[in-house]
Amino acid sequence: MTEAIRHRLNDSPFARWTVLIIVATAMMMGYFVNDVMSPLETLLELPKSQGGLGWTPSDYGFFSGAGSFINVFLLMLFFSGLILDKMGIRFTGVLACSLMALGTLLKLYGVTTDFGDAEIAIFGFQLPMSVAVASLGFAIFGVGYEMTGITVSKAMVRWFTGHELALAMGIQLAMARLGTAAALSISAPIARHFSLSTPLLVSLAFLIIGLLAFLVFCVMDRRLDERKLPASWEEGQGVEEKSSSSEEFRFSDIGVTLRNPGFWLITLFCVLFYSAVSPFLKFSTKLMVMKYGVDADLAGFFSSIAPFGTILMTPLFGLIYDRYGKGVTLVITGALMLTAVHFGFSLPIHSSTIAIALMVTLSIGYSLAPAALWPCVPKIIPLKCLGTAYSMIFFIQNFGRAIIPMFVGKANEADPTYTTSMLIFGFTALGAAVTAIAMLVVDRKKHYGLQLPNIKK
């Protein structure tokens, strides 16, 4: 497809922003479900006689990391990118939403079924059957969750290239973080007022809403293709791929991505940065209770400061990048702020005021880096293999998200003061900052344009 035809597909502001809201809604529902169990750690660890499941911190750490198991160990996240580039956004999005719903249903079964004293050994962990079943459900959910992420990212690049790309991705991330913040805020009160399974029932309903939203996008996207594409094009030739790239994806294109040093630096940054954020949020509710003496019903609100803060700030920083550039500078600043936060949490200070200040700082850093990072990827990777590139980034990133929670769970058992686990997060974030500095050096040599504005004048 020529450049002129491609712009005819996305020059309508109404079409662009409607697509954004629809697909971001599906992603927001996935983010809600991903963190819905995080505030329930203290409840899950209660004895069964008190309404809990009798899990240990190690059990919870295993469960938290399970969302990445299939993606990492069975390479499913990598294959998700291939599916996206070969089958298109519509097919992959529907598949992703369906897998999230299926995994959540299985997780609900694991939490609500009485397995007695049955246990199973997995990867050297001796797990109660409820943990094993819930972890399997979370692993299946994780496949759909990550598949949704790369699908929505490619949809944003397709519709907003040459326009407000960073702002659109910022709003998409903000809506996703709204889902995270909602989960951290309301999950524990709902569970305490009703039962442990109620937040999962709410999650299942939200995922169905997300699936319906994506189906609306599919109808709209197909109609736009049919209306915008020239009538002379052959039917049945894959209009979605034609509208998203002038060349068809080939497996040999993977080598182009793997030989790109910018790709590897962005990937390494993602591994380190998100390993210092996402697993931390899963443990932060209990941290607020145990170290800072926050009431269990309010601890989730403390933890939700970070994702709530990103809701406004991520689009703002995205708009700044769109108009003024300096993308890598924003990424470096965000990583350094995250480093300072985790080292601050490792100090022997027990003031809830300090905890709030650190969470606010975390929200700023958590907004800065992603707002600039994700719009950098299409500047170094061709659109035709962008899905595979995103999937490889997320695939490698999932190693950190799978391994870090297990180490942190063990560290919290050995050191209940949380000093050790916060130092783990702190040095991980510091590694991300160093990687971002290297990214700036490479950008100056390779001229990717990562420091240039996104809006073409």
Image: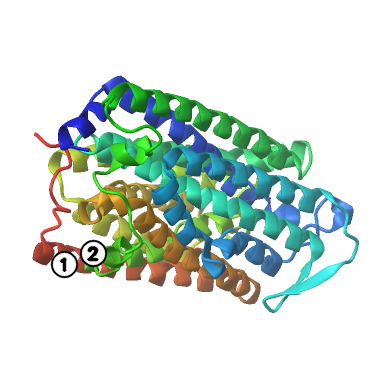
At 56% from the left edge and 73% from the top edge, which residue is drawn? 407
Residue 111 left/right relative to 21: right
Residue 42 at x, y = what percent? 70, 55
Nearest the viewer among 38 and 173 is 173
Q: Earlier in the sequence, mark 1 or mark 2?
A: 2
Q: Write down the residue under mark 1.
A: 442
In the image, residue 147 sits, relative to residue 262, either above or below, namely above
Q: Quadrant of the N terminus?
A: top left
Crowdedness of circle 2 by 10 Å Cα count: few (<14), some, many (20+)? many
Residue 291 at x, y = what percent? 58, 60
**Mark 1 vs 2: CB contact within 8 A:** yes
Q: Write down the residue under mark 2.
A: 262
At 83% from the left edge and 69% from the top edge, which residue is drawn? 119
Q: Secondary structure at mark 2?
A: helix
Q: Which amino acid is tagged 1?
A: Val
Q: How is the image coloured?
A: rainbow
Residue 154 left/right relative to 2: right
Q: Quadrant of the C terminus?
A: top left
Residue 222 at x, y = what percent? 41, 28
Label 1, label 2: how far apart the Cα atoms are = 7 Å
Q: Secondary structure at mark 1?
A: helix
In the image, residue 427 sits, relative to residue 229, either above or below, namely below
Q: Is residue 240 visible?
A: yes
At 85% from the left edge and 51% from the top edge, which residue is drawn? 113
In the image, residue 101 sits, relative to residue 41, either above or below, namely above
Q: Which amino acid is tagged 2?
A: Gly
Q: In which quadrant of the rendered view does residue 426 lie?
A: bottom left
